[in-house]
């Protein structure tokens, strides 16, 4: 046996850990390019609606499931619905944890590599697209950075919930806030920043399509780490003395604020130097280095940016690994260190094809996709929404909305979840998410 369950030692511990999980590549890398390609503020408005109607209710639901059961996702469903197949939803979450972390670590590795590229200096008129493609298509460097990132992730998880996760998020999250503020102040004071702000704040509803709605709902799940049991797992370390509605509000609020604020760091800079905000996934690795190269002291700001991105990725990666480790510790009685180290190695290996897929395995296609895109599609576009919708159905109809409401409102806090919750969790969320899935599949098959 592994003894009594560890608990966060303070409210700040949980909020920073959960916000650390939520704030990641999704807020900076993914949010900025999805906003750039989906109509700027029009996307942001729809995304905010998705956060309020789907993100926040799902956040409190997952935390409540975790806190009540004091278990990893598989154990949580087993504890709340014994002798039913619902534990499979938890198992799907553990599977998503493996897959997402395996490629997340590869992209995070690019970000760490770019810290050193920034130190070496971003030189104007460089072919930054060529530099980026050169980096990701090479064999050695991305694998080494992927390995280093996994060692950091597994090292923190091996140290435990309080001495590992909580200790590190208390250091890294304030660093992240400070770096972000520095970057925003720099970007907003660039000559020509106004155009970027206008692009970001002027809603172009003409650009909104069904795809925009789906992108907004998908982004809401990904950015809040929902649908795969990460928040169930972190909730399982939350004490009964803490109110879930308030804590969930802090986490969702911080994540949303950071995504919105990151937009104020990125779009003004992109416009000030005449680049294209709709550059897609290469926005932060190709466009931003070009921006930094033009900016006074740009290498310093580039350095700050990629440290920020790497720190954000690390505090998310640890939550992905914690899902897998908590499952082995709770269900299979593994010692934490053994689980963290061995799963770190396994996930590193599972990630290798995604990086080789840009280089020596460049011709490989799985159902028509590059390997990394396939992993992302499988996990983010299929497993997360399916896991999320099933969790909502479970909470609303099996565990019962009433029980979730009581759990989230106990002990009483500033926010009180009302009856609206039942409508959202039982009907609105499952239907909205299944529509997303349906369109994803039609789009994919069509
Ligand atoms: N929320 C993270 C991000 O925005 O980058 C990604 C993520 C972390 C998704 C943990 C899921 C998860 F369990």
Image (cartoon, rainbow, N blue to C red):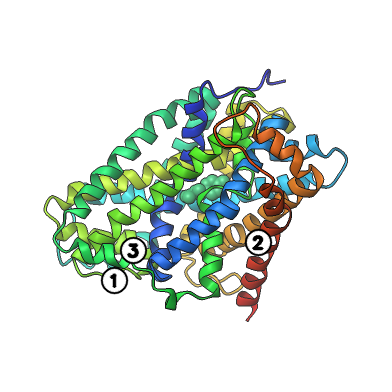
Residue 269 image offset from top left, x and y in percent: 23, 60
Question: Considering only order in the chain, which callout, 3 or 2, is on the residue closer to the N terminus?
Answer: 3
Helix or strand or loop: what does disc 3 sit on?
helix
Which quadrant does the N terminus fall into? top right
Along the viewing direction, whichever of 302 and 140 lies nearer the viewer:
302
Question: Considering only order in the chain, which callout, 3 or 1, is on the residue closer to the N terminus?
Answer: 3
Q: Which residue is mark 3?
A: 201
Helix or strand or loop: what does disc 1 sit on?
loop
Which quadrant does the C terminus fall into? bottom right
Quadrant position of residue 179: top left
Q: CA distance from mark 2 to mark 1?
A: 31 Å
Q: Are marks 1 and 3 in contact (CB under 8 Å)?
A: no
For label 1, the crowd category at 10 Å Cα-Cα, with few meaning under 14, some 14 to 19 and many 20 or more, is: some
Residue located 66% across and 45% down the image: 94
Residue 271 image offset from top left, x and y in percent: 23, 66
Is 83 left or right of 225, judged from the image as shown?
right
* Vertical placement of residue 216 versus 390, above or below: below
Q: Are marks 2 and 3 in contact (CB under 8 Å)?
A: no
For label 2, the crowd category at 10 Å Cα-Cα, with few meaning under 14, some 14 to 19 and many 20 or more, is: many
Residue located 54% across and 32% down the image: 414
Is 322 left or right of 387, judged from the image as shown?
left
Question: Considering only order in the chain, which callout, 1 or 2, is on the residue closer to the N terminus?
Answer: 1
Which disc is residue 276 wearing? 1
Which disc is residue 433 wearing? 2
Along the viewing direction, whichever of 120 and 226 lies nearer the viewer:
226
The residue sitting at the right extreme is 83
- Which of the two discs, 2 and 3, sits closer to the camera? 3
């Amino acid at each position: 046996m592994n003894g009594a369950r560890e608990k966060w030692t303070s409210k700040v511990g949980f909020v920073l850990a959960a916000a650390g999980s939520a704030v990641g590549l999704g807020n900076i890398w993914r949010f900025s390019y999805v906003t750039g390609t989906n109509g700027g503020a029009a996307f942001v408005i729809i995304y905010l609606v998705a956060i309020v109607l789907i993100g926040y209710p799902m956040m409190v639901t997952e935390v409540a499931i975790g806190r009540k059961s004091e278990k990893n996702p598989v154990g949580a469903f087993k504890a709340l619905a014994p002798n039913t197949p619902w534990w499979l939803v938890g198992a799907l979450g553990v599977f998503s944890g493996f897959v997402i972390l395996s490629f997340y670590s590869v992209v995070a590795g690019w970000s760490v590599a770019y810290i050193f590229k920034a130190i070496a200096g971003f030189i104007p008129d460089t072919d930054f697209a060529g530099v980026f493609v050169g980096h990701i298509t090479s064999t050695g460097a991305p694998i080494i950075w992927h390995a280093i990132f996994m060692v950091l992730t597994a090292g923190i998880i091996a140290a435990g919930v309080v001495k590992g996760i909580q200790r590190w998020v208390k250091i890294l999250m304030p660093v992240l806030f400070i770096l972000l503020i520095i970057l925003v102040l720099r970007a907003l004071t660039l000559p020509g920043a106004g155009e970027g702000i206008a692009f970001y704040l002027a809603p172009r509803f003409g650009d909104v399509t069904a795809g925009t709605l789906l992108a907004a709902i998908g982004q809401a799940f990904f950015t809040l780490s929902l649908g795969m049991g990460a928040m169930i797992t972190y909730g399982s370390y939350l004490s009964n003395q803490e109110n879930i509605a308030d804590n969930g509000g802090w986490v969702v609020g911080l994540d949303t604020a950071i995504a919105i604020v990151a937009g104020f760091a990125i779009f003004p800079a992109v416009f000030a130097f005449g680049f294209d905000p709709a550059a897609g996934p290469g926005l932060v690795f190709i466009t931003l280095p070009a921006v930094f190269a033009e900016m006074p002291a740009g290498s310093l700001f580039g350095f700050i940016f990629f440290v920020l991105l790497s720190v954000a990725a690390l505090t998310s990666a640890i939550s992905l690994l914690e899902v897998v480790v908590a499952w082995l510790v709770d269900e299979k009685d593994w010692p934490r260190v053994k689980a963290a180290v061995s799963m770190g190695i396994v996930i590193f290996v599972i990630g290798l094809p995604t990086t080789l897929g840009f280089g020596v395995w460049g011709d490989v296609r799985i159902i028509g996709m590059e390997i990394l895109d396939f992993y992302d599609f499988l996990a983010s576009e299929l497993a997360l929404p399916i896991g999320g919708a099933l969790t909502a159905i479970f909470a609303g109809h099996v565990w019962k909305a009433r029980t979730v409401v009581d759990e989230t409102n106990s002990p009483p806090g500033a926010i009180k979840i009302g009856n609206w919750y039942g409508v959202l969790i039982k009907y609105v969320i499952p239907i909205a998410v299944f529509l997303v899935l349906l369109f994803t599949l039609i789009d994919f098959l069509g």
